[in-house]
Image (spheres, rainbow, N blue to C red):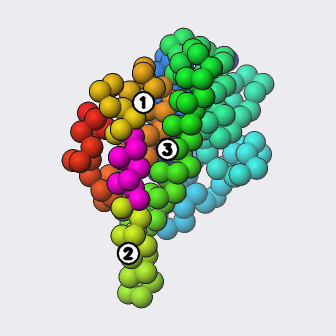
């Protein structure tokens, strides 16, 4: 039975899972849930609603297992399909790598979130627009500081955790979204840019 992944446009967390599935060479059925700029994810996919109490993608179905949350899905994929690995083999190195994934998902993305309005229709009222523009401008120095932390972690290496890992996938997706949303560039962070 082929795995099934419920995904959606604009979901960086669903992209994380898609990248991991591709890296591991796993075949899956891709179910793209409906999305529009004006309505968002409406109507919600009934299978996503049934499986995930958070009511969002990604959702992975592998046989009789139904799992949600990108980090939990990546951990499951690593356990069930360990080759090629996306986490280091040694427990302390794995924990550090998971911390970098968490940093990207929870810390960096919190700074990028104020930029997300840039993908939606413009509010015709200039006052709310000015307020969200100001919030986004205040977020950009924080994003740049996060880039600096990642840049220092990479140093002279190629990847965050020695080899390509879930941390690289998570960081890549948040950075990609920040750049697409007009956030700070990577010019001052050569290791990260590379």
Which percent across, then down, holds residue 5? 60, 33
Q: Main secondary structure of the magenta part?
A: helix
Which residue is denoted by mark 3 in the rendering?
104
Which residue is denoted by mark 2 in the rendering?
133
**What is the distance, in whole Å, between disc 2 and disc 1 at their CAs?**
32 Å
Query: Does residue 27 show up magenta in the picture?
Result: no
Q: Quadrant location of residue 133?
A: bottom left
Q: Is residue 112 left or right of residue 48?
A: left
Which residue is denoted by mark 1 in the rendering?
160
Q: Is residue 95 above or below residue 26?
A: below
Q: Is residue 16 above or below residue 21?
A: below
Q: Secondary structure at mark 1?
A: loop
Tell me if residue 159 can be seen: yes
Which percent across, then down, holds residue 76? 67, 25
Asked whether 54 or 139 is in front, the reply is: 139
Q: Is residue 121 left or right of residue 70?
A: left
- For the record, the magenta segment spans 142-150
**What is the distance, in whole Å, between disc 1 and disc 3 at their CAs?**
11 Å
Q: Secondary structure at mark 3?
A: helix
At x 32% / y 31%, what residue is drawn? 155
Mark 2 or 1: the one toward you? 1
Which percent across, then down, holds residue 94? 58, 24
Q: Residue furthest top?
A: 83
At x 33% / y 58%, what residue is drawn? 183
Q: Is residue 181 above or below residue 132?
A: above
At x 36% / y 38%, what residue is drawn? 152
**What is the distance, in whole Å, between disc 3 and disc 2 at their CAs?**
23 Å
């Amino acid at each position: 039975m082929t795995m099934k992944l419920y995904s959606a446009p604009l979901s960086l967390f669903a992209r994380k899972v898609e990248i991991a599935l591709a890296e591991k060479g796993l075949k899956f059925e891709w179910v793209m849930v409906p999305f529009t700029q004006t309505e968002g994810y409406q109507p919600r996919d009934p299978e996503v609603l049934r499986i995930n109490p958070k009511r969002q993608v990604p959702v992975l179905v592998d046989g009789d297992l139904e799992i949600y949350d990108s980090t939990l899905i990546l951990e499951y994929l690593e356990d069930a399909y360990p080759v090629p690995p996306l986490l280091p083999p040694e427990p302390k190195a794995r924990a550090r790598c998971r911390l970098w994934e968490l940093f990207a998902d929870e810390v960096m993305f919190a700074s990028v979130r104020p930029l997300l309005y840039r993908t939606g229709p413009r509010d015709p009222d200039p006052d709310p627009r000015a307020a969200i523009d100001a919030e986004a401008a205040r977020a950009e120095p924080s994003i740049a500081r996060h880039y600096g932390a990642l840049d220092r972690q990479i140093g002279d290496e190629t990847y965050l955790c020695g080899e390509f890992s879930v941390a690289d996938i998570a960081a890549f997706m948040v950075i990609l979204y920040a750049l697409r949303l007009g956030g700070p560039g990577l010019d001052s962070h050569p290791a990260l840019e590379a």
